[in-house]
Image (cartoon, rainbow, N blue to C red):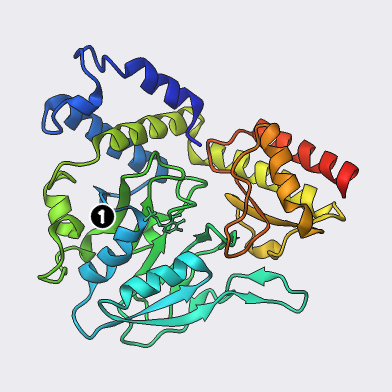
Amino acid sequence: MLPAPVLEKAQKEMLDWQGLGTSVMEVSHRGKEFIALADKAERDLRSLLNISDSYKVLFMHGGGRGQFAAVPQNLTTQGDRAAFVDTGVWSKKAVEEANRFIGADVVASSYQDQSGLWHVPQDKVVEVASSARYLHYCPNETIEGLEFNFVPKASNNAPVIADMSSTILSRPIQVDDFGIIYAGAQKNIGPSGLAVAIVREDLLGQARKDTPAILNYSLTDEFDSMYNTPPTYSWYLAGLVFEWLLEQGGLSAVEKINQHKAECLYQCIDNSDFFNSQVAQDSRSWMNVPFQLGDSSLDALFLSEAEKQGLRALKGHRIVGGMRASIYNAMPLSGVKTLIEFMNEFERTRG
Ligand code: PMP
């Protein structure tokens, strides 16, 4: 979801942005109006995440997967190795992509406890080879709904790289804990087509010679994220989302709402004899809440009846099955409450 006030503002400005008589999509990205928009979006993002001057904020192409390649290309040379934490589908895809360029070693993985519940690895310091160039992990696994509630460190103090695609802007973070934070935009930032990379300055300037220019962090920085034509409409909408988040009171206010939304939904699942969660308390995502029905033969009925209530996109990813409620920033508490009421009613009548 995108926040309704953002979509309404975009609708209002569609044909006449800033009194120019055109949409923002039609103006030049090199014009002063778009450059002012880009500057403001960066300033607002810096303010939301409290990003210090020792980090560059880059607006890039290629989504989350583009960054799977950009990270090894910008930080390593041929023959290097890096360490990866594997907590699910997106961690594995990051490993797969990195392996095109380096040796990617999985050094820690999610695990099931004796009751079958899933946990993220609990080590605050992850043991890595002394030569590991960085430690990569996914703070929130979108498909499995596994989220870290701490930031792991590498035993050799290598920079920690985080794929925050599905958790960025959901709560405050300490940017200084990371070498690079990156995210595809289409969860909490805006529409797809954009990726944000927050890169510690000292990690610039090390890209391989054969790195494609549009994935090169130093070039992107040098050209203020406009080495080539950026995805201007996504950038514009991201800027509106940042303004909306600031109006909500910033990330500490947003955190409270997100925590409450997630707690209400997990409580509904835990209090039920019909629905269940396979994720342990210490690793539960605030953004993606997978759950199963006690009787999976009712899955299709659950989905079709949910749809009738306007509750969409609840089908879990085919890899894990069951259901998944994605409750990103723009999902209001009332949406979560509607889902809970529906689940309670479904259990009462069909369970
Ligand atoms: N990482 C995570 C955690 C994701 O959830 C996704 C997309 N769902 C990706 C990476 C890939 O993003 P994209 O489709 O923008 O390449």
Task: State the residue in front, 197 or 4.
Answer: 4
The residue carrying mark 1 has its beta carbon less than 8 Å from ligand 1: no
Q: Position of residue 278 (x, y in %)?
A: 71, 64
Q: Position of residue 286 (x, y in %)?
A: 60, 51
**Residue type pointed to by label 1:** Ser
Task: State the residue in front, 2 or 150.
Answer: 2
147, above or below 88, in the image: above
Q: Position of residue 116 (x, y in %)?
A: 73, 74
Residue 99 as seen in the image, left or right of residue 265 = left
Secondary element at tag 1: loop
Residue 127 as seen in the image, left or right of residue 310 = left
Task: State the residue in front, 153 or 196.
Answer: 196
- Give the tally of numbered discs: 1
- Rendered image quadrant of residue 101: bottom left
Q: Position of residue 63 (x, y in %)?
A: 33, 52
The residue beneath circle 1 is 54
Residue 342 as seen in the image, left or right of residue 83 = right
Residue 177 visible somewhere in the drawing = no
